């Protein structure tokens, strides 16, 4: 029997929600990055790691960097959770580039990547994240409206509000890949 280890980092709860859904589907433990045990990750058949996207970075990816030697050769499945729609090819490329840059060199190109859409609640944002979103909104407001992508217009329309895009059905490709790759039926 394969044993999987799922680690997540989720400052606002959206990545945690996806992690819990994935763990439920695969019957594996789901551990917050702050409590993750490198020895358990090393002893697992495969590691799943997920986190929120913040300014092009993946929260929790430091777990891979810090434990690169222990995880060498192990199948790794990454999932991101962010406000940007990963179905948009431009967003998907941007997410992939950011994650690949952040990965330890020996893991680049071999970690399977899946991206999910989360949400945002401006009232719950940290001061830093609130400032980043305010700067982004201000820069979009100063651009020619005709040059804005639909996603930019959506961001401006929902700025300052709570928006939720989490969708349990979107985890199906990740779950199917893990099951197929590891022979989990």
Image: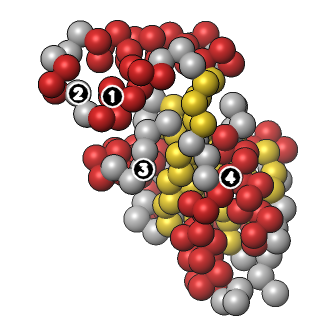
Residue 138 sits in quarter: top left
**Image position, residue 143 (x, y; %):** 20, 15
Q: Is residue 32 left or right of residue 105?
A: right
Q: Is mark 4 on a helix, strand or loop?
A: helix
Residue 68 sits in quarter: bottom right
Instruction: Identify the residue at the far front of this view.
Output: 157
Which residue position is annotated with label 3?
Answer: 86
Q: Residue at x 80, y 65 (%)?
A: 24
Q: Marks 1 and 4, how far apart in space?
A: 24 Å
Q: Is mark 3 on a helix, strand or loop?
A: loop
Q: Is residue 68 left or right of residue 28?
A: left
Which residue position is annotated with label 4?
Answer: 18
Give 51 or 68, whichever is nearer the viewer: 51
Sequence-wise first label, 2 or 3: 3
Which residue position is annotated with label 2?
Answer: 148
Q: Is mark 2 on a helix, strand or loop?
A: loop
């Amino acid at each position: 029997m394969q044993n999987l280890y799922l680690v997540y980092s989720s400052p606002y709860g959206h990545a945690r929600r996806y992690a819990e859904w994935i763990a439920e589907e695969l019957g594996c433990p789901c551990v917050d990055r702050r409590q993750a045990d490198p020895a358990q990750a090393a002893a697992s058949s495969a590691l799943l790691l997920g986190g929120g996207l913040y300014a092009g970075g993946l929260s929790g990816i430091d777990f891979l960097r810090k434990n690169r030697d222990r995880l060498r050769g192990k199948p790794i499945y990454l999932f991101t959770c962010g406000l940007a729609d990963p179905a948009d090819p431009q967003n998907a490329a941007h997410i992939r580039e950011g994650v690949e840059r952040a990965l330890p060199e020996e893991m680049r190109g071999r970690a399977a990547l899946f991206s999910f859409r989360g949400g945002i609640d401006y009232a719950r944002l940290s001061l830093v994240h609130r400032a980043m979103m305010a700067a982004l909104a201000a820069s979009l407001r100063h651009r020619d409206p005709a040059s804005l992508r639909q996603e930019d217009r959506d961001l401006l329309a929902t700025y300052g509000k709570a928006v939720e895009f989490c969708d349990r059905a979107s985890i199906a490709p990740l779950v199917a890949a893990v099951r197929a790759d590891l022979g989990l039926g």
